[in-house]
Amino acid sequence: AGIAVGNLASAIGITTEDAALVADLKAGSEEAFAVLIAQYHQPIYSLIARSLNDPADAADITQEVFIKVFRSIRGFHGEASLRTWLYRIALREASNQRRWWSRHKKQEITIDSPAELNSDAENSRLCLGATLTDNADSPFDRAVQAEVREHIESALCQLPEAFRTVVILREIEGFAYEEIAEILNVNLGTVKSRLTRGRTALRALLVTEHSTSDSNSASSSALLTSKETVA
């Protein structure tokens, strides 16, 4: 049986480990489903949270993704990797939620104000995967890293959906161009074009907000100095 699973994995281009997990899932194994959730819940949740207009909906949508996976696993035939297939379902559900949000919540007013952006936007290449992962050692470093991460998350939310999705999949999730093309069902040239334009737009947002933040800080300092002089 092990040899058969290995041959199947080689034939359809997925790993032997994934092939075995898929076989167990198709057999209705609750343990296999628990393994799937343990392995993919956090990355799927993060992907959805960054893709939605309202990240507060991410938990419910993530749950819906795994329900869809459980119901449709028998239709998975290994044309793509298991991870690619899961992300495709996750993005489809996120897209459905965005459409619902646009229809029902677009006119609602939120008390949350957008975060000010302040980052190393002048760098020639964005390293979002590292920035959005908290690996700091000291409390000060953690505070700085959290602030930078918040700024980039805020900027990501302002990107057009097509650009944001490709930037997230490539820079944060680490997918290859070919895998992104599979997930989004677009050609390789479209992926590269969207990624280039998304990176450029994100840098522009960060630079603009960084300049605005510096200007506001300078104004505040000048006001404080003026008050001290008067006193």
Image: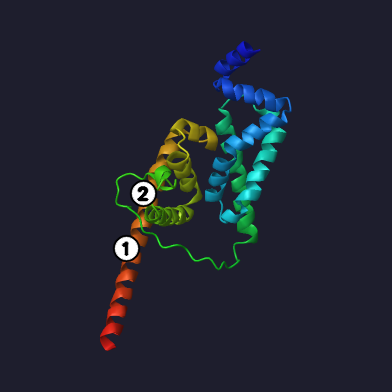
Q: Which residue occupies 43% across, 54% down?
A: 146
Residue type for callout 2: Thr
Residue hosting label 2: 200
In what quadrant of the picture does the N terminus appear? top right
Q: Which residue occupies 62% across, 61% down?
A: 105
Q: What element carries label 2?
A: helix
Q: Is mark 1 on a helix, strand or loop?
A: helix
Q: Which residue occupies 66% across, 44% down?
A: 63
> Above or below — where is 183 with respect to 16?
below
Q: Position of residue 21 (x, y in %)?
A: 63, 25
Residue 77 appears in the figure: no
Residue lying at the far bottom of the rendered structure: 231
Residue lying at the far left of the rendered structure: 229
Q: Please give left or right for residue 110 compared with residue 177 in the image.
A: right
Tell us which disc is closer to us: 2 or 1.
Answer: 1
Residue hosting label 1: 211
Residue lying at the far front of the rendered structure: 138
Residue lying at the far right of the rendered structure: 28
